[in-house]
């Protein structure tokens, strides 16, 4: 283990500080500043800030030519009220680190200490703290930032904690790792009328009532194979909160999921066709828009082999996993780099995004050891002067 007991005390303290001060996507100013303050003493060759928003990249250079290897964690929390009795529970009403990003950041902070003591011999190690993962906007914004071109990686690795997998264990497989998903917002406009004469208006209620089961039938879920589709209705709003008015306006929101990007286009087309049919049948105008767009995340075989080797060498038990129904914007980095994400066990805890979820401190060391071993295997260690 490259981290000392003193390091672990500092890292646990860092995670608890991050946990107390959660910031949601696009608002991660204080979180980014906390990370910069922690990693500055590790003397990276360069720290890039304001990357794709509030992103931070710490760069550790080797003396010899070699590949650029990026390890990525997420800065953002969730707009969910935390229900916890811990002494480091969220101090921000309505916001909480209920997906474990505080733990992911802390793992990279541990890597910073290891890279300070033993820099890479060749190439570059990049520690990326990415903003706005939860909305799907962060990775795209980082990649589009002109500052990213100078640090674009050859290899990109990340992790996500997984409740139900024992702490100290890991899961990884080649191929699809996270589903593609996107939210569709459907807005119907008709005409209000008196509730006693609904025939004098054009209500969106029948269209929405038809669409809820019809859209759900397009994506019934099932096995996570290449034909997997899931449509989840997430929000419905119709008319005014009054008994005397038949509605003239309505919205329906749903999330569409497929295992890969190739299947998403067909699912969107089928959903749009149903919406237009419902609008026409009920004499409504309709507008559709897409939000929180996530491309699927693909684990490249060579990158997976590197992480498996690191797990074996660090005696971290691991096994295969199926694609996650959840989405991740990390997949975008795989378009320019060999990339892979593994699942880090977070044990018998609440599910992700539950109001009582908390990342286990005992998982910090395991994640750090796997990543550091992968970095050493690819970049070596600088020889002592």
Image: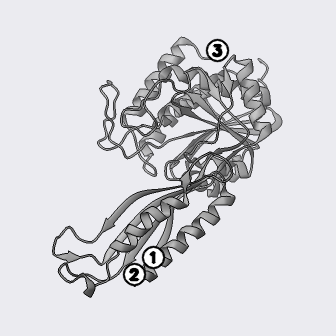
Residue 178, image quadrant: top right
Q: Residues within 10 Å of mark 2 (few under 14, many from 20)?
A: some
Q: Residues within 10 Å of mark 1 (few under 14, many from 20)?
A: many
383 or 201, which is in the foreground?
201
The residue singled out by tag 2 in the image is 282
Query: In the image, residue 243 lies at what x, y percent?
Result: 16, 71
Query: In the image, residue 266 lies at what x, y percent?
Result: 64, 65
> Cβ–Cβ below 8 Å for labels 3 and 2?
no
Q: Mark on residue 278? A: 1
Quadrant of the frame with the C terminus: top right
Gap in Å between the C-alphas at discs 2 and 1? 6 Å
The image shows residue 185, relative to residue 372, as above or below, that is: below
Q: Nearer the viewer, mark 3 or mark 2?
A: 2
**Horizontal side, residue 311 vs residue 204: left or right:** right
Residue 383, image quadrant: top right
Query: In the image, residue 259 lies at what x, y percent?
Result: 64, 51
**Horizontal side, residue 20 vs residue 334: left or right:** left
Q: Secondary structure at mark 1?
A: helix
């Amino acid at each position: 283990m490259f981290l000392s007991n003193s390091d672990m005390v500092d890292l646990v303290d860092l995670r608890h500080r991050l946990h107390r001060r959660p910031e949601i996507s696009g608002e991660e100013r204080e979180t980014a500043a906390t990370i910069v303050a922690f990693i500055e003493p590790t003397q990276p060759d360069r720290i890039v800030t304001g990357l794709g928003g509030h992103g931070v990249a710490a760069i550790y250079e080797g003396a010899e030519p070699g590949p650029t290897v990026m390890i990525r964690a997420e800065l953002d929390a969730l707009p969910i009220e935390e229900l916890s009795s811990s002494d480091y529970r969220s101090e921000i009403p309505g916001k909480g680190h209920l997906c474990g990003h505080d733990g992911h950041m802390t793992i990279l902070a541990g890597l910073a200490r290891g890279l300070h003591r033993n820099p890479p011999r060749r190439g570059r190690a990049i520690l990326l703290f990415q903003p706005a993962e939860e909305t799907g906007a962060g990775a795209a914004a980082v990649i589009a930032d002109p500052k990213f071109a100078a640090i674009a990686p050859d290899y990109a690795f990340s992790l996500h904690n997984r409740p139900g997998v024992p702490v100290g264990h890991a899961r990884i497989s080649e191929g699809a790792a996270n589903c593609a998903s996107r939210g569709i917002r459907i807005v119907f406009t008709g005409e209000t009328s008196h509730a006693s004469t609904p025939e004098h208006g054009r209500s969106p209620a029948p269209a929405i009532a038809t669409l809820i089961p019809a859209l759900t039938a397009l994506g019934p879920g099932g096995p996570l194979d290449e034909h997997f589709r899931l449509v989840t209705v997430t929000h419905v709003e119709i008319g005014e909160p009054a008994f005397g008015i038949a509605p003239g306006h309505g919205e329906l929101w749903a999330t569409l999921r497929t295992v890969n990007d190739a299947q998403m286009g067909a699912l969107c087309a089928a959903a749009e066709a149903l919406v237009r049919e419902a609008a026409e049948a009920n004499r409504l105008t309709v507008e559709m828009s897409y939000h929180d767009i996530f491309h699927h995340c693909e684990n490249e075989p060579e990158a997976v082999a590197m992480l498996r080797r690191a797990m074996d060498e660090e005696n971290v038990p691991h096994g295969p996993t199926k694609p996650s129904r959840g989405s991740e914007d990390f997949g975008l980095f795989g378009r320019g780099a060999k990339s892979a994400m593994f699942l880090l066990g977070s044990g018998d805890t609440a599910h992700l995004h539950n109001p009582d979820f908390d990342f286990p401190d005992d998982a910090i060391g395991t994640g750090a050891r796997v990543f550091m071993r992968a970095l050493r295997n690819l970049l070596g260690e600088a020889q002592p002067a």
